Amino acid sequence: VRAAAAPAAALLVAALLAASALAAPLPLECHLEARAEKVLKSCSSPVVSQDLDLRSAGLVGISPGAFNGVTVRDLKLDSNLLVEIQAGTFSGLRVTGQLSLNSLAQLTRVASGAFHNCSAALFYLTATGLATIQPNAFEGLTVAAPLNLAQNKIEFVPSLAFRGVVAKGIYLDDQAPPLTTIEQGAFDGATITAGGKLSLNHASLTTLQPGAFAGMSADALLIGQTTLRRIDEGAFSWEHSVTTIGDLTISGNAQLTEVSLKQMHFKSVTIQHNALATIKSHSFEQLTTTGDVVVDEPLLTVIESNAFYSATIGGKLSFPAAAKLSSIQSRALHHATITGDVVVTDSLALVTVGGEAFAGATVGGSLRLDGGQIAQVQQAAFKETVITGSLSLANNKIAEGEGGLAADAFSVLRAHGGLDLSNNHAMRTIGGAAFTGSEFSGVVRLPVATTYLLWSLVSNTHAFKPGTRVDAPGMLGAVCDEAGRAHMTWLGNATVCAECPPGSYCPSGDSARPAHAAAVPCPDGTGM
């Protein structure tokens, strides 16, 4: 084996020497080591051109400290024969323009401390043979733009690989062969400045090790088009590391079926076009964001119980592509706080809103569940829910009774913007207890008015609180009195009430058909 290796090594050296002989000349400010191979010894700051153009110079090495104290506009080292960037190679270098290390086909390794105390406006290390990054390789490097490491051969990112780097992004996209492993704490101590992101597109990651992103500070993290099957909160926490990530985007991961961000803190979360069919129980429990959470998953069918339990979302919560969503299970958003709207609309499959699904939740905007196939609203689904805007269940298929609208579905609900149940044509009656203790500052819009629907409401004690405005097609709007009775004008010819204050007008005759009864005074307050 050794005998065969010697000729191969000799051939490589010969090839390097031949390439060096054809290389471009060095700038006057740069000097070589006194050896056969072209190893750059040192450079000084350029005086005339402001640039150091060392592209295709046949360099096989750069001595540590070769650029120490140098200030240059552009330093271009593309298409050389470097095998390794040693410790201290770029220490003390200041680049006001771009530091370019592209197309270094022989490069395989960046050593620890290679860029200590180095700064650049732009940084490119792309399309090389780079496979190995040592821990602390980029420590002390400051880049005003993203640290671009795309299109290399990095399969493995070790712990502390990016400690001490400050950049407007780290791009590890499109590695070939693809990136497969990110070790615990790989980005610990890295700082991605405002407007930047950590980008991992087209990585062949199947799992993320615990703490893979722990300890980093990033304005944004993009995990896209990987082979990941699961992402959980463990990826963002490690020992006592403090992780600060602004916008988290998980997008286009065709095998990703599970995401859990329990007790995590982000500015916003976007999960889109993956393979999520289920948001599992407790997956987003106590998730905290200052902005929106968007789950745009075409395959989503179920939001399981306690999925968003006690989550605090500083913007809106929306499910824009939930055409297959069939069930929001019991307590799914129990005690969640959402500053903006909650939007689950136009689902062609959503049939069930589970018991206590939104119980105790606080919604600063509106809660929209309209335009779907909802047939069942289970017990206490909106009990003690507080909604600053309106609650819309319009244009669904909600029916009354068992298997439809639970008797206490809206008990102690406070929807300041009103309640919309319009165009639920299967609904004929509503139990009086459905609205027990509820408050509506806006209009309560009912399905198309029927005699039985109106009578079921007004014949129950305190169906609505005083001052509630109630409306339905075929009925002129009415305002409930201080006794909680809905005095509704039915087609403009009678006032429908159960117990009414003396002096008001109530129907006489058959109580089952009040709309066709004559309007008579109600002297004793009974109306019967």
Image (spheres, helix red, strand yellow):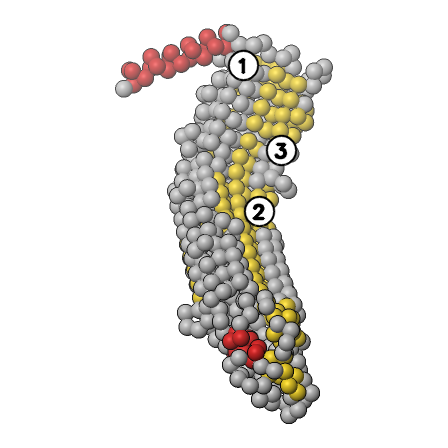
**Mark 1 → mark 3, Cα distance in angstroms:** 25 Å
* Identity of the residue drawn at 51% across and 13% down: 58
From the image, state whether disc 1 or disc 3 is nearer to you: 3
Circle 1 crowding by C-alpha within 10 Å: few under 14, some 14–19, many from 20: many
Q: Amino acid at mark 1?
A: Ser
Task: Give the residue pinned by disc 3.
Answer: 145
Q: Amino acid at mark 2?
A: Asp
Which comes sooner in the sequence, label 1 or label 3? 1
In this rendering, the answer to whether 278 lies above or below 156 is below
| Farthest right residue in view | 48
Circle 2 crowding by C-alpha within 10 Å: few under 14, some 14–19, many from 20: many
* Identity of the residue drawn at 46% across and 51% down: 323
Viewer-side residue, 400 vs 225: 400
* Residue 89, image x, y percentages: 56, 26
From the image, state whether disc 2 or disc 1 is nearer to you: 2
Which comes sooner in the sequence, label 2 or label 1? 1
Secondary structure found at label 1 = loop
Identify the image quadrant of the C terminus: bottom right
Secondary structure found at label 2 = strand
* Identity of the residue drawn at 61% across and 74% down: 490
